Amino acid sequence: MNEPEAMRAMLAGKTIAVVGLSDSPMKASYGVSRTMQRLGYRILPVNPAVQEVLGEKAYPSLTELVAAVGKPDIVNVFRLPKFIPAIVDEMIALGLNNLWVQLGIVNEEAAAKAEQNGIRVVMDRCIMIEEQRLGSRDS
């Protein structure tokens, strides 16, 4: 978990499903996702409480997102730690391979289960900071 090689491999993808993406510009999920979008990533919002964020249709669940647009390269999570196990279970069921849990969010049990099921995990790291630090995109 959290190996630089794993982060680089994930960031080589082009689509990021953002679970818990808010439509409020005051929220970290919005600012981070907007920056990632500006760096060339397609942001796919997953939040049942919103219709659209950053010009993209929002989906109520990963299952509905995958059914509509296919598998994202990364699942980036902005939810409380108690919600991570259900997200991992949904990822396993859908065959999604890359879980990125944002800075300040930790659920070691869920991370272990994800890794045991072949999911690459980055946890307690900001995707925007790591993208800029690792320089994986030409910006």
Image (cartoon, rainbow, N blue to C red):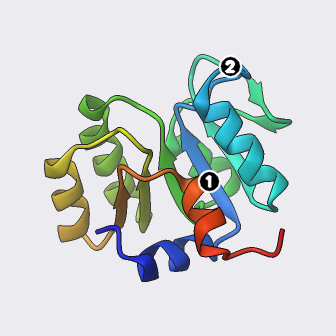
Q: Is residue 24 above or below residue 112?
A: above
Residue 76 shows up from this direction: yes
Disc 1: which residue: 128
Question: The residue tagged with tag 1: helix, strand or loop?
Answer: helix
Residue 59 shows up from this direction: no
The CA distance from mark 2 to mark 1 is 16 Å
Q: Is residue 22 above or below residue 111?
A: above
* Horizontal relation, residue 138 to residue 124: left or right: right
Q: Residue at the spot x=76%, y=35% of the render?
A: 57
* Horizontal relation, residue 87 to residue 35: left or right: left
Amino acid tagged 1 = Met
Q: Nearer the viewer, residue 62 or 1?
A: 1
Q: Residue at the spot x=36%, y=49% of the render?
A: 124
Residue 26, horizontal then vertical, whole percent: 68, 19
Amino acid tagged 2 = Met
Q: Quadrant of residue 113?
A: bottom left
Label 1 packing within 10 angstroms: few (<14), some (14-19), many (20+): some
* Horizontal relation, residue 106 to residue 3: left or right: left
